[in-house]
Every structure is written in C-alpha cells, then in structure tokens.
Image (tube, rainbow, N blue to C red):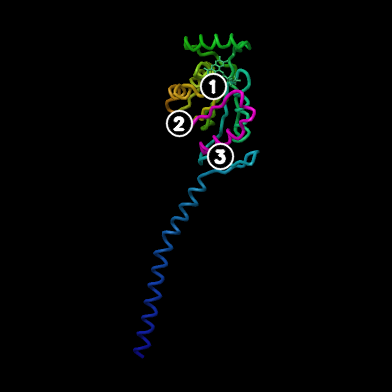
Amino acid sequence: MNKILIKCLSVFLIFKEVKMKTIKFALPITVIFFLFISVLSRCVAAEDIKGEKTMLPQGTKKILVAYFSHSGNTREIANQIHAIVGGDIFEIQSAKPYPDDYHAVVKQAREELASGYKPVLKTKVENIKAYDLVFIGYPNWCSTVPAPVKTFLLEYDFSGKTIAPFCTHGGGGMGRSVTDIAKLCPKSTLLDSFSILGSDVKTAQSEVSKWLKKIKITK
Ligand SMILES: Cc1cc2nc3c(=O)[nH]c(=O)nc-3n(C[C@H](O)[C@H](O)[C@H](O)COP(=O)(O)O)c2cc1C
C-alpha cells in the first residue's frame, strides 16, 4: 500500500513539475504574442489604387498633398504621390499668376526672395486641422521654396503635423529648401525629402514608390 502511495505521489510531482515548466515557458510566449498583435493593430493598412499598402500610424486622420508648380513638373509628382497615398490634393497658387516667360519668372523670383515677399494665395485649405500628414511639393526656385510656398507654410499652423517635402529641380536638388521649411515650421516633424530632375518626372513612379517606402508611408 505504501509503495502504491509513494508511486502516486511521485507521478503527481513529475506531472506538477512538467506543468510548471510549461507555464514558465508558455507565459512569456503568450505575452510576446499579444504584444505583437497589439503593435500590428496600431497600424491601419489600406489598399491604394495601385495595390501598394499604406501603413499609417493609428490616429492618422487624413493626408494632404499640397504643391506649387509653375510649369507642371511638380504637379506631375504630386499626382503620382496622391495616386498612391490618397487623401486630398491642393494646388498652392499665387493670387497674381507668375509670368510664363522663363527669364521674367526667374527675375521675379529673385526679387521676391531678396525682399522676403509673401504673395497672397488664390485659394485656401478648408480645414487644415483635419490633416496630420502633409506632403509639400514645389520646384526648387533659387535654391529654396518659391514665395507662395513660404506663404502657405506661414498661413497655416503646422505644429504637431508631419511634413514630407518633395521637389523638382534643374540640377540643384532640394537646395536649402528643407532647412528653410524647418525654420518656417519649427514645431513640425520633417520626414526625409524627395527630389527629382524636372526632366525625369514622367518616369518617376518607381522612385516615388521607393521614397514612400523609405519614409514608411507604404510598405
Ligand atoms: C524662377 C525659377 C528659379 C529656379 N531656380 C532653380 C535653382 O536654383 N536650382 C535648380 O536646380 N533649378 C531651378 N529652377 C528649375 C526648376 O526647379 C525646375 O525646372 C522645376 O522642375 C520646375 O518645376 P515646375 O514645372 O513644377 O514649376 C528654377 C526655375 C525657375 C522658374
């Protein structure tokens, strides 16, 4: 009888030990699993029209793609970005249009830069508060942002918003435009910028996609 009792007790103890080990092992794995699921669910995955997935942090309200373009290159890139990320698109326009002639516009841009002129804009963004990720596109003008973009950045409150700058250029890349945007919007988070030669915009889709992945807007 004693032998049977001892055998039962030892089986019970072995079972208990195995169970404890299982719990010790399973518990951290379960915790890690739930942590992983909760991190994943913090991202909103949305299918865009090209089949690329946007991965936006939870709480991202809306995207605005705002751009200024004089001869159409930056508009082309803005449309490519908008086709991928969705949201709203807004063209920044001066109330007084710039001349079409290249030399005339260069002369005017230089004068505006030297005087710190901020032109009145033609249209307004209805509710800037609704957006927390704003793409800002512009041509490189005299190594910085064109005056209407300066007005745009000062006209609205970009505090707490994320800004993704992009530009088209004639060889000067972003110039000092990113530094200037950072000065104009000191309370915004600036993502890595994207620049492309004006002559390459028609075939820029893969470069644009690569950039959007790099700044973790798409995956
Ligand atoms: C007034 C003016 C100033 C410019 N200044 C520069 C410059 O400093 N560096 C540069 O690389 N390109 C410069 N460019 C070339 C433009 O950045 C380029 O052509 C751009 O792609 C035009 O974009 P858009 O078609 O959207 O207006 C300038 C063009 C203009 C009209």
The image quarter containing residue 32 is bottom left
Give the residue number, with chain letter if any, for mark 2: 189
The image quarter containing residue 212 is top right
Asked whether 212 falls inside the magenta stretch, the response is yes
For marks 1 and 2 on the same chain, the one whose residue lies earlier in the sequence:
1
The image shows residue 76 at horizontal and vertical percentages of: 63, 26
Name the quarter showing ligand 1: top right
Q: Is residue 131 above or below residue 155?
A: below
Give the residue number, with chain letter if any, for mark 3: 218
Q: Is residue 102 above or below residue 199?
A: above
The quadrant in which the N terminus is found is bottom left
> What amino acid does circle 1 point to?
Gly
- Residues rendered magenta in the picture: 191-219
Asked whether 197 falls inside the magenta stretch, the response is yes
Crowd class of label 1 (few under 14; some 14 to 19; many from 20; radius 10 Å): few
The image shows residue 165 at horizontal and vertical percentages of: 51, 27
Q: Within 8 Å: ligand 1 and the Cβ of disc 1?
A: yes
Residue pictured at 56% horizontal, 36% vertical:
210
For marks 3 and 2 on the same chain, the one whose residue lies earlier in the sequence:
2
Mark 1 or 3, closer to the camera: 1
The image shows residue 189 at horizontal and vertical percentages of: 45, 31
Give the residue number, with chain letter if any, for mark 1: 171
Give the secondary structure at mark 1: loop
Give the secondary structure at mark 3: loop
The Cα atoms of the two marked residues, 1 and 2, are separated by 26 Å
Q: Is residue 27 left or right of residue 93?
A: left
> What amino acid does circle 3 point to?
Thr
